[in-house]
Image: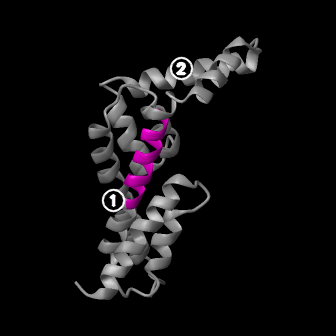
Amino acid sequence: MTWGVLLAWLTSVAFGVVSAIVPVVNAELYVLASQVTLEVGVVPIAVGVGIGQTIGKCLLFYGVRRGRQFRFVQEHREKVRAQPRGRVRQALHEAIQFLLRLVGTKRWGLPITFVAAVAGIPPLYAVALLAGATRMKLLYFAPVVLVGRITRFLLVAYGVNLLPFWP
């Protein structure tokens, strides 16, 4: 492995972490832009961004899981529960509860996570937050996200390389 490949890989991991936590930073565009020069190749970039995205999504997962223990979070939840719910707020609450039950089940939790990691529907950001609020284990969540994200970024990178006008 050359220094250039190692630097590209480390940069990809770092960009993946940032793009996993900050939704407006687009990892797919990074993968596409990295293919313009074809200096490094598809695999190091896709794997690096996939690893970085997995680290970032695990941080979100863990943040929700441990964040419930903070006193200010508990106080805010109590204050929100005390407020009366209108129709819209009640519908949103019921939808979130349904999604929590669905992502938290052994049968559907990991398949939903994998589809979100590969296809982006539902958004993986939301699934990571929901999964952190359920009993899903990080030990199961992380490998599913890793395989899904690497698959997604390899498809993006190889897909653009198949275009006839791409250099």
| Residue 25, x across and y down, in percent | 58, 62
Q: Is residue 53 magenta?
A: yes
Amino acid type indicated by mark 1: Ile
In the image, residue 75 above or below residue 155: above
Q: Which mark is residue 78?
A: none
> Is 142 located above or below residue 75 in the figure?
below
Residue at x 64% of width, y 22% of height: 75
x then y, percent, for residue 101: 44, 20
Residue type at mark 2? Gln
> How many neighbours does mark 2 have within 10 angstroms: few (below 14), some (14-19), or many (20 or more)?
few
Pick the quarter of the image with the N terminus: bottom left
Q: Which residue is mark 2?
A: 97
The magenta region covers 52-64
Residue at which label 1 appears: 150
Q: Earlier in the sequence, mark 2 or mark 1?
A: 2
29 lies left or right of 4: right
Q: Is residue 133 a member of the stretch shown in magenta?
A: no
- Furthest-left residue in view? 1
User: Regarding mark 1 in the picture, which secondary structure is present there?
Assistant: helix
